[in-house]
Image: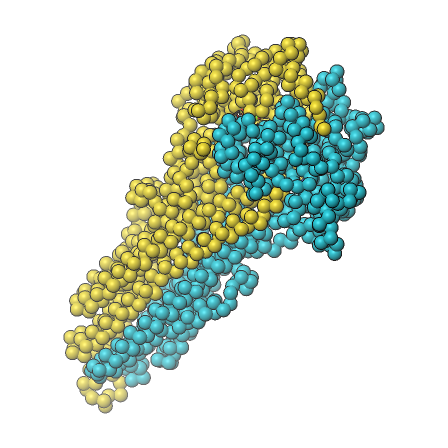
Amino acid sequence: MHNGFAPHLRQRSKAEQAQNFWGTTWRLLRYLKPWHWLLFLSIIFAIAAVIFSVSAPKILGQATTTIYAGVKRGRAMGASVSQWPIDFHKVGHYAVQVLILYGCSAIFSLLQQLLTTQLAQRVVYTLRRDLKRKMRRLPVSFYDTHDHGDIMSRMVNDMDNVAATLQQGLIQIVTSAFTFIGVLVLMLTISLRLTLVALITIPIGMVIVGVISPKAQRLFGKQQATLGTINNQVEETYTGQQVVKLFGDEKREQERFEKGNKQYFNAAWKAQFFSILVFPAMNFVRNLGFLMVAVVGSFLVAQGQLAIGAVQAILQYQEQFSRPITQLANLANVFQQTIASSERIFAILDEPEMKSDTVKKAQPAQTSGPVITFKDVKFSYRPDQPLIDHFNLDVAPRQTIAIVGPTGAGKSTLINLLERFYDVNAGKILLHGVNTQDMTRADLRRHFAIVPQETWLFHGTIMDNISFGHPGASAEDVYQAAGLARADHFIRTLPDGYQTVLGEGSTEISTGQQQLLTIARAFAANPEILILDEATSSVDTRTESLIQAAMDNLRANRTTFIVAHRLSTVQNADQIIVLNHGHIVETGNHESLLAKGGFYARLYNSQFRHALR
Amino acid sequence: MFKIIHRYMDFLPATMAVLFLFGQTVCDLYLPTITANLVNKGILQHDFPYIIAIGCRMLIVAGLGLIAATVNVFLASRQSMKIGAMLRSKLYSKVLNFAGQEMNHFGTSTLITRTTNDVVQVQTVMFQVLRQMLRSPMILVTACVLAYIKAPRLTVIYLITLPILTVLCLLVLHYATPLFHSIQGKTDHINQIFREGLTGVRVIRAFNHEDHEQERFDQVNRDYTQTGVKAYSLVACLFPAMTLVLSLTDVGIIMYGGHMIAFKTLNVGDLIAFITYTTQILTSFMRLSRMFVSLPRASASAKRINEVLETPHSVRYEPTTTDASQQTTSSNPETGQSSVPAIEFRHVSFRYPGAERLALDDVSFKVPRDSTIAVIGGTGAGKSTLIDLLAHLYEPASGQVLVQGRPVNSIPANQLHHYLTVAQQKTVLFSGTVRTNLLKANPHATTDEIWHALDIAQASDFVKNAGGLDAAVQQGGHNFSGGQRQRLAIARTLVANADIYVFDDTFSALDFQTDANLRMALATDPQMKGKVICIVAQRVATVLNADQIIVLDNGKLVGCGTHEELARTNQTYQQIMASQLKQGGGQHA
Ligand SMILES: Nc1ncnc2c1ncn2[C@@H]1O[C@H](COP(=O)(O)OP(=O)(O)OP(=O)(O)O)[C@@H](O)[C@H]1O
Ligand SMILES: Nc1ncnc2c1ncn2[C@@H]1O[C@H](COP(=O)(O)OP(=O)(O)OP(=O)(O)O)[C@@H](O)[C@H]1O
Ligand SMILES: [Mg+2]
Ligand SMILES: [Mg+2]
């Protein structure tokens, strides 16, 4: 088993439970720091809104009491009065107070919500930006070893979770907590006894939340884990959809999917059920409290120990009083999930980065010596499998160097090292006599243009794709590069020509045509050193020889590295390096190597042996 | 959204859910009525037994409410998650059966988002609909009715308040919906750029394009953030505005109700109940308004899901009447009539949607059983298109493609792989292990069969080096070299059990030695005896010994025959040969 060497991010299956809850929470909160004044203000506003809205029912209750007082007074006067003597001046006074209170509360809660929206969106903006920036500092090996599906899921789903919580959850804690405190205080000012009666419901509520909530949380964990599994499968089989189809694998994949989907369904509905059940359960507790307050209140009013308005107010508060508990219970769930999500995002942010190259500013001087020197280079992808060892090579300027060798010999690896996608383990690579490790990667790469073995074009027009390596390129430059790469003709036959938009995977053009575009892209960059890694492997030989002729014309002023299996491509090279198992087996030009009758000659002649049966 | 509800909702449980919801609502609303009685009769008339009795009644009503709510939550969560599961599995099977055209039309990443993210959005809202959405109007109506019973004249105040609230909600909905739609589109855009950063990391870095990428990302990110701020700010206005309306209503009730009491047309208890109803009506409005945040997003998601589900399949399956009889004979070439060609193209033409010219133009040829054919032709000549038509990934515009005498469109998609198997030009490996990758082609393959396939594909050496069949295959197979990936894909094709094996330029990354060894092994392997091998290639050396070579040029079949025939008579073939012999050691050929 060799899974050990792949530095996997924490697996999805374990991901639902935050590993370091408080550490991650603290870290997420630190993202709020740049906007601490925003946060501070919105908390203040939230509290203000709570205070105003919380005190309104009390005043409203006083209005009722006033009305009731009038009725009682009227009753005392006897049934003869046609109209109860209600003090409407006082009632009106209370009404205005209520209006003002609610008005202030509305204004403050509006301000608070606007601020929170700003805050939440900005924090998530920063988080997203940081993630993208981080991706920039991660070595290519990270990209090679981690599932893109998993990274995307962190970027999309986990980011969504964090955003939603910041938008709605954060301030709700403040509001809920303050509503609870505020209501409690006000209830106490109205009637100590009734408040105590109402408080009896709290332990009951706590017990209910304590029983249901952990269950819901566990189920939520299971739900997220199974969702992760299904999402991974979707990512994988959609990317390789044609392969799945061609092997008639749809049914099995569908069965596997159904299984996961079913597991998800089972966990999800239960999670949903239990997490929502808290609300009606708490509602019942609230009604219980309601009942007790009503009954006890009635006795007290009947005995004249309490005003009727007080009962009304407490009844109204009773409602507001239990809601925060429910909300807090619910928020605990949401926060668990959010922190787990943040942790998955932070896991990427914590990946070891490439060695920073901000401090190094060495610039190669144009000297007369070799352009590129490999000195005692040692490298391997895995410590247990040495690949390149004691590799030495000098490349004179304006030469064409061909690297040939069987597949897996290490040709692309040399290019990885040259471009510093991977760094050497020992030894050094010099560009114009300067160690490439002492240059910034950007400075180094400015000297190169590459056609990688694996074609990659982005979602955009053909024009933009070709000018990718030379952003200032004029349309003329692009046409010229396309012409040299023999792509011009086919591009012009497309309905939209150079403005044709290539989609994901650029399936609109044939594989060979894609490769022609990558060649044109490298040509358009007009580099000092051109690197072609199997650049024409999917291009037909007629087109290939035309491209080669075009390159031969330009050879005079640039150094070119060519990796190719079609030896026809490398025959004209100044120097052919034959590579096997990461070692140089022999060097020379085509004629001398053929004459030598060694590895190269064997390789060359094998193309004519046993063709198809 | 409604389409989805209509199509995928189970109506019995859904109706039950709504009924129980109604029960809960009635209970919730009945409580204030009882409280009113408590105040009016119990407190004002000092009737203690009545207070106790009514207390018991309240308890029962609250209990019933709890039961109804529990049943409702149960049904609603099951129902909404079921809809989610159903949508997901419908989408999954739909996409798996998509032909090339539909895949190209949508693009992989948006299909992934639609199957995962969008479905979750819809199922979440579906739950809210079953639990909340209907509850709020119900509370509204019931509360209004109960309030009317309590104090008909006081309800006049609602005639002013409710329209204001409705207009408020509609206004916000009107302005927020397009914003949320656009947010969903922008999410796609952000994801696409981020994904490109993953897949294109080497090119982006090699061309020093990282600053530009970051900028592109930041721009979309900013754009997304701004739209988000706008949308949520709009929604944020709703809540305070409602609070204001609530306070106005309360004040109105107190003033107007107070006067009514003064004139003895209203009881104080009724006033209290009335205020409670008002609070409930307004809370339900607020809950409704909170859903306006998720509703527009979910309906955007629903629309995106429907788009996928309603896409017609461009590739059709048309069973023929002779289906059954032909299947028995044709799936086994040994027993079938040898006169039936293994592959036949009859005047096949094909045009990609949106393309001006035909990708294949009136192509006809036959391939007899037990033979090797090769397809050669320039870049963009239509070779892969031909293979894709053979594998029925596309439907020809005209003409017919037959495999073992059967039109491909009469072979069910899940049967076609018994007839032929294809190694595609672009290698796709899945993360996992070498074994899991190879088993994709044939889940029943034994370890020996797998090794045998690896042997033919010249892959066993490096697989052994990497640690055997359980060696890890990382993202896209990037821990293997280009040629090694290609050989793994070839081995995967060989593990499959079919009559026709197609290799679409899959030797391009192999060195000549390996290429030659591979072809040698293919030709001599007993397992390959009696099978049709179809090779797409660029090198004349590769196709030299094929029984039949098909030469394509610009979508037209310009030659068909053996190497000798074509070398004598076919101009295009001669040109191809010339381009290789010129440099490629003419002395040998
Ligand atoms: N990211 C990686 N992690 C681990 N091993 C790797 C990685 N990339 C390549 N290898 C291994 O290193 C060796 C050399 O690979 P490289 O890509 O340099 O070969 P190559 O000469 O370019 O071959 P090809 O002609 O097939 O492209 C191979 O055995 C391969 O399996
Ligand atoms: N999805 C598509 N939409 C529009 N046009 C397409 C699409 N796929 C291919 N084409 C066009 O159809 C023609 C034939 O493409 P095809 O992929 O069959 O070429 P090919 O012979 O396989 O070439 P190559 O050797 O480069 O792989 C090309 O001109 C190409 O631009
Ligand atoms: Mg390589
Ligand atoms: Mg092709």
Q: Can residue B498 be seen in this view?
A: yes
With respect to residue B305, does B139 lie above or below?
below
Query: Which shade of the palette goes to chain A?
Result: yellow
Instruction: Indicate the quadrant where residue B451 lies.
Output: top right
Toward the right, the furthest residue is B569
Q: How many marks?
A: 0
With respect to residue A10, does B303 lie above or below?
below
In-front residue for pair B166/A612: A612
With respect to residue A248, does B543 lie above or below?
above
Query: Which shade of the palette goes to chain B?
Result: cyan
Task: Kindly identify the residue that appears in the image at 62 percent across and 25 percent down.
Answer: B514
In-front residue for pair A536/A553: A536
- Of the 4 image quadrants, the one containing the C terminus of chain B is top right
Q: Where residue B551 appears, x then y in whole percent?
A: 76, 33
Q: Can residue B389 be seen in this view?
A: no
Q: Where residue A279 appears, x then y in whole percent?
A: 34, 62
Toward the bottom, the furthest residue is A80
The answer to whether A251 appears left or right of B65 in the picture is: right
Q: Where residue B450 appears, x then y in whole percent?
A: 57, 35
With respect to residue B405, does B37 lie above or below?
below
Task: Kindly identify the residue that appears in the image at 40 percent across and 73 percent down.
Answer: B23
Q: Where residue A460 appears, x then y in whole percent?
A: 59, 38
Colouring used for the render? by chain
Task: Kindly identify the residue that appears in the image at 61 percent across and 15 percent down.
Answer: A599
The answer to whether B497 appears left or right of B74 in the picture is: right
Task: Kindly identify the residue that appears in the image at 39 percent across and 56 percent down.
Answer: A271
Instruction: Indicate the quadrant where residue A578 lies.
Output: top right
Instruction: Indicate the quadrant where residue A211 lies.
Output: bottom left
In-front residue for pair B65/A35: B65
